[in-house]
Image: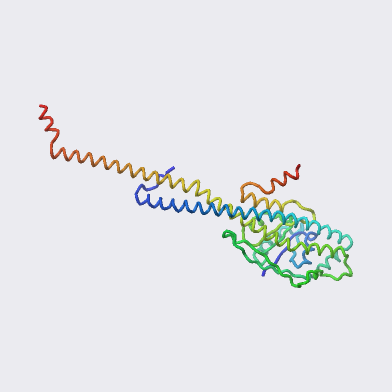
Amino acid sequence: MSKIGVMGDWDSIYGFSALGLDTFRFDESNIQEAGKLLRLLAETDYTVIYITEALAAKIPDIIEHYRTLPTPAIILIPGISGNTGQGLAAVKKSVEQAVGSDIIFGKDQKGTDQ
Amino acid sequence: MASTTVNPTRMELTRLKRKLVTARRGHKLLKDKRDELMRQFLGEVRNNKELREKVEKGIAASNKNFALARSGMSDEAVRVAFMSPKQEVVLSTATRNVMSVEVPVYTYTTRTSDPNDIYSYGYAFTSSDLDDAVTSLAELLPDMLRLAESEKTCQLLAAEIEKTRRRVNALEHVMIPEMEADIRYISMKLDESERSSQTRLMKVKDMMLEDAHHYKEKAEKEYA
């Protein structure tokens, strides 16, 4: 039995606590702790960890480390400050890694430009 | 290019030939694996993209609801409301095998079976906007889990595809040509040494015949 964690600034994540997910709050003052906690959660029984894009941007190397490991799934979610497109960029990265070039998103971006 | 370290012997030749057959078969199998992985991956990644767009839209909407709710309440009241959650989500993880890549499958159970039993507060001191916000987020949860599943699957498949592609390329462009060149080198070397021993034997035979019958002397005598 495993758990689901949510990491980010309070404003972005407090709603998830009502759903029964474990929320871990980080703001500017304790951002260094975020990497440590993420590692700790990953090594205990958290299988899915949602993390706000803003916080994820501060600890990219740790997220990258868990990317190809079977657990946990670290999923970026947009925070209260808006969508930075980082989450979709992660999907795009998978495509580029697998195919060699981006064939899924390239078309869409062209479509929105026109 | 044939490496100079290879031993030009018949034993080495048979060993290399056997190795080449294995490498060719491995190359074909890995190529098939890569193609199938790619097919699975492209399906999954489209799914992933759709889910992500949906979830991001949903989160943005519920964030709006939460902002609305907080505008009518004090920070303390919101904090108190979410202090002790009523609901609890327990996740059970299984794995599914896609071309020998173990990808996760998540199923979740909630502590209370009633999906409406999520409000961790009494309704007296909170605005109704907060109820809406929590509901919108709760409705999003299944999609968020599917997103997690799909995204992890994509990441694992992508890593496996990269690995397999590298192996295929190494076999196709390095191992197999190298072995072919080595085999060519050995067989040419063996042919060459066979020819050289053949000529040596012929020469020796000539010398021995000369020794036995003295053809040259006889011929000289005849002319004289």
The N terminus of chain A appears in which quarter of the rendering? bottom right
Check the image and report above or below for B206 versus A73. Answer: above
User: Residue visible at 74% across and 44% down?
Assistant: A111
- The residue lying toward the viewer, choosing from B113 and A53, is B113
Query: Image quadrant of residue B93?
Result: bottom right
Residue at the outermost top position: B224
User: Residue visible at 86% across and 71% down?
Assistant: B122
Q: Is residue A98 left or right of residue B19?
A: right
Check the image and report above or below for B35 versus B133. Answer: above
User: Residue visible at 74% across and 66% down?
Assistant: A21
Q: Is residue B12 left or right of residue B153?
A: left
Query: Image quadrant of residue B3?
Result: top left
Percent x, y of residue B95: 62, 64
**Picture mark count:** 0
Percent x, y of residue B88: 74, 70
Question: Is the image coloured rainbow, by chain, by secondary structure, or in one colour?
Answer: rainbow
Percent x, y of residue B200: 25, 41
- The residue lying toward the viewer, choosing from B83 and A114, is A114
Q: Is residue B51 left or right of residue B214?
A: right
- The residue lying toward the viewer, choosing from B178 and A112, is A112
User: Residue visible at 69% across and 56% down?
Assistant: B48
Percent x, y of residue B18: 41, 53
The C terminus of chain A appears in which quarter of the rendering? top right
Q: Is residue A22 left or right of residue B133?
A: left
